[in-house]
Amino acid sequence: MLHKSLCRRLIVLLGLLVWVSTLTAGLREKTESLIYDHYGDSVSVLFKKIPIPKEIKSTAEKNAQLRFMRDQIYIWEISRNEEMIGLAYLDNVKGKSQPITYAVFFDSQGMVEGSHIIKYREPIGGEVSNQYWLNQFFGKSWESDYKIGSDIDGISGATISVNAVTRGIHRSTYIVEYLLIQKNE
Amino acid sequence: MAIAQDEFFQPGSTIGGYGELHWNKASNADGESIKNTMDFHRFIIYYGYNWTEKWTFKSEVELEHNFVADGEGELELEQAFVNYHTEKFGLQAGVILPSVGLINEYHEPPLFVSVERPEYNKYVIPTTWFGNGFAVYGSMSGLNWRVALMEDMEGEGIGAGIRSGRGKGYKTTAYDWVKNISLNYTGIAGLRIGGSYTMNNAPIDNNPDSTVSFGLAEVNLRYDANNIYAVLEYGDISYKNNPYDYTSSGGYYLDMGYKVAGLAGLDGKLMPWLRISDYNRGTTDGTVNPDKHYSIKRFGLTYWPISNVAFKFDYGTHKTESAKDKKTLINVGVGYNF
């Protein structure tokens, strides 16, 4: 009797969790919601899908020790009162077997102000989505060190995801630095 | 212009794996050598295939002790399941692992410090515990839950623990199902804290009318940050109809280490650590069988040149309460995962 009533309660709980999980937003909507949370509701954003600049692509890949999975990335130019105050960058890296989609928010000098996992597609290693881990990238730029274990803490049981996201964020700093220089010229 | 959910996804396969070589030496209370062996204990190939962003297949095939013939060594299909995964919820069906303790699901050698897995993870939690079944899981704000329903254990194998009751997916029964419920929290930097409960009325010789019942309750904690490493696992198994009349068994282990940064001239991490452990494989109404009550003290040194490779050394004693069986053990090993 006790068993049956416990099972019934569990089924109701699981049904509720499935229903909640269907309410997730798309990648762009989720990223833009985080952009407004971070930079403030008063900013204007300009979304662009751009080819990876070939002038910086191989340098970024070599220094971050990670190849791009695709030829294009997503960028949002963030402005307030017609002055650009930052860039948001969306890309993906390969985890154990699935892509991990991540966003990095930069200030106008190419320094990381925030980072988020927009979509994680694996049943294990999802701890890289935790904000306490992602906050370690605050203040980093293309000139920073990204060594796991000394500059960036590892996460036990999420080694592959930690390596992938760390390299992905490192790689993004080169692209953003290049785009900011182009913009200012 | 929207970004399609599956724009980053490409169908394809993934290969991974892990393995570990051990050199085990042991001597008895008189200092006489009772063991001096080398063993490539585990060699595992992971293979996965992604059909879509949500639907995937994952598997692990394991060769134990480097060789299979005449009852020596083991070849096991340790995992093989279809996985449906969304960001907050997922399903698995096939050969799966119950979520019990820290090591059953996360058993790659660089993730634990000793050469051999802690004895707790053999005689209290019988890792690697796998079998046919289904699981539902999910996570929200660092809180992760999972419910698994799996094949029955084999009642005739349960006695001084449940290790020999594992069916390993070989023609097992599904009269009562192993029910495994787990919860853990990973929302604080470096900390994982969790627990699980697993129960089954395990048929004896496939007879559902004659069973050994058990309930395994365990809690676990792991902290690995700021160069501090601490692991604590505690588990208790209660029995009904245990063939040896045991009413419970269980115990704990505690690992404490400190990662020494910047080993002279070498990259990576070096960590001296200590383990204390106490467990019993049989207690009857509160009275522990002294021959089945073990205490362990161990010191070790683990070096990770990179996070995927670990060189390990450990030294310690292993004795029973009855003092009939005291051993000194020295282990050296190397493990990897990719």
Image (tube, rainbow, N blue to C red):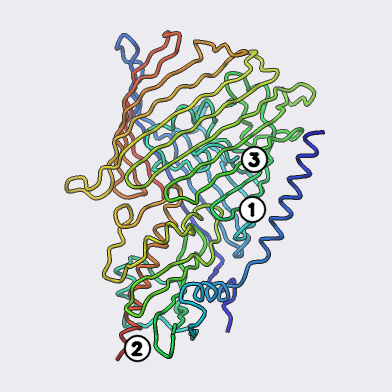
10 Å crowding of disc 2: few (<14), some (14-19), many (20+): few
User: Up-down: is B325 above or below A159?
Assistant: above
Location of residue A37 in the rendering, given as x and y in whole percent from the top left corner: 51, 72
Q: Nearer the viewer, residue A4 or B105?
A: A4
Tell me the amino acid under the disc marked 3. Ile
Location of residue B181 in the rendering, given as x and y in whole percent from the top left corner: 64, 40
Q: Residue at x 26, y 70 (%)?
A: A143
Residue placed under numbered mark 2 in the picture: A183
Horizontal side of residue A12 vs B220, given as left or right: right
Residue placed under numbered mark 1 in the picture: B82
**Chain containing the residue with disc 3:** B
Q: Quadrant of residue A73?
A: bottom left
**Chain containing the residue with disc 2:** A
Q: Nearer the viewer, mark 2 or mark 1?
A: 2
10 Å crowding of disc 3: few (<14), some (14-19), many (20+): many
Q: Residue at x 53, y 62 (%)?
A: A120
Pointer 3 and pointer 2 on the same chain = no
In 3D space, how far apart are the residues under numbered discs 1 and 3 (Cα atoms)? 20 Å
